[in-house]
Image (spheres, rainbow, N blue to C red):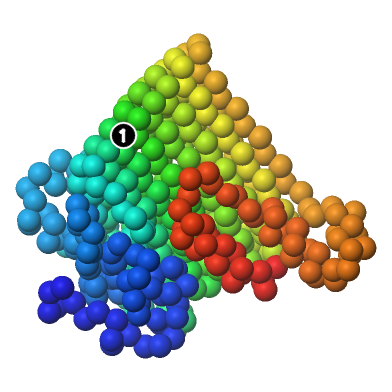
Amino acid sequence: MPETMKGYSDLESDDLKRIELTGLQTESLEGRSGSFLQVDGHIHHASTGTKGIEILPIAEALEKYAWLEDYYWKAVPRDKDEITQYIAAREPKGYVLIARKGSQTVYPLQTCLFLAKDDIQYVHNIIIAEEGAELHLIAGCASSMKTMKGAHYGVTEIYVGKDAKVTSTMIHTWGESIEVYPRSVTIVEERGVFLSNYVCMVPAKKVQMYPTAELRGEGAVARFSSIMLATPGSYLDTGSRAILSAKGATAELITRAITTGGTIISRGHILGSVKDTKGHIECRALILKDGTIHAIPEIEGRVVDCELSHEAAVGKIARDEIEYLMARGLSEDEATATIIRGFLDVRISGLPETLQKQIDAAIDAAEKGF
């Protein structure tokens, strides 16, 4: 690791605890294939010990690999909006993660982008899984408890090669006054698989994100799973989109949302423009106290033989379900927590146990706020 990287030694204990809530291990890399930490605009750590896997700061990667220009701002246009324009106008920050052809990670890689003192933290990340590679990533984002205001601007471009697989689990642990604007596009080639899990169970002032997967290769697969909690004062405008552009492509967009007083806009859009494609959107939401949940599922078929569907439901916990559990010895609070826990249980077939535990831990940490 270059001497300019400070590691974890100069971070305050409270900040380390916030960072660890995102899934990043700081004391040991046991159970991890690699690690990256950026605090504000400074790279603190970047390393991997796994053969065929490389993680490095984006500025260093652009200097090291001329071919990276073929991926840089190619999935996300630099002039998409004011967020991308802001990032494009500045020195590159963030990371590049490369999984070489045929490589596999036994354990997930971990990354964390931490907002401490800057008014705006900006990053540009590029993830490349070459043909036949398999990659699991825990991508955490957080802010210091001392950070009373600020914003995070992010661009992420993901490229899933032929027969490759990328699983990305993003855990947000922002403060109540932080605004977050990720911009993400994933390109999936022939028989490639992209699994995206998003967990936001800690209050944030505003989150605006609409990640998109473009399934360009035959048999390509994408699945977005989102679990969100909006507390009073939170405004979460989130969703996901899939573009089915090749025969046999399939996509599934799954959302579980809860509000205890905040607002959630849950968007979903699947576009089928080629025959023999399938897509499904599912949004289920609970209003526990006050608050607003607005589900906007869109399916758009442009040819025959594309099968698209959606379902959405917004409601409350049924009283008879609570009474059923209370009759079996649980208190009302315990019964309510049990039902919510089951509602949020979005298990994904084939998800590594480590990633599932990370999702479960984030939900467990938020249960006291229900």
Residue at 39% over, 70% down: 24
Q: Position of residue 343 (x, y in %)?
A: 69, 53
Estimate the x, y position of residue 124 in percent, counting from the top left: 26, 56
Residue drawn at x 44%, y 48% as measured from the top left: 196
- Please provide percent x and percent y for residue 27: 35, 80
Residue placed at 18% from the left, 77% from the top? 5
Q: Secondary structure at mark 1?
A: loop
Pick whichever, 151 or 2, lies toward us.
2
User: Would residue 254 appear left or right of 86 to someone viewing this image?
Assistant: right
The vertical placement of 256 against 223, above or below, is: below
Image quadrant holding the C terminus, namely: bottom right
State whether residue 38 is above or below residue 210: below
* Residue extending furthest toward the top: 304
Please state if 120 lies on the left or on the right of 318 as rendered.
left
Give 160 or 353, whichever is nearer the viewer: 353
Quadrant in the picture for residue 120: bottom left
Label 1, residues with CA under 10 Å away: few <14, some 14-19, many ≥20: many
Residue in the picture at 12% in, 79% down: 3
Residue annotated with mark 1: 163
Residue 39 screen position, x and y as percent: 30, 74
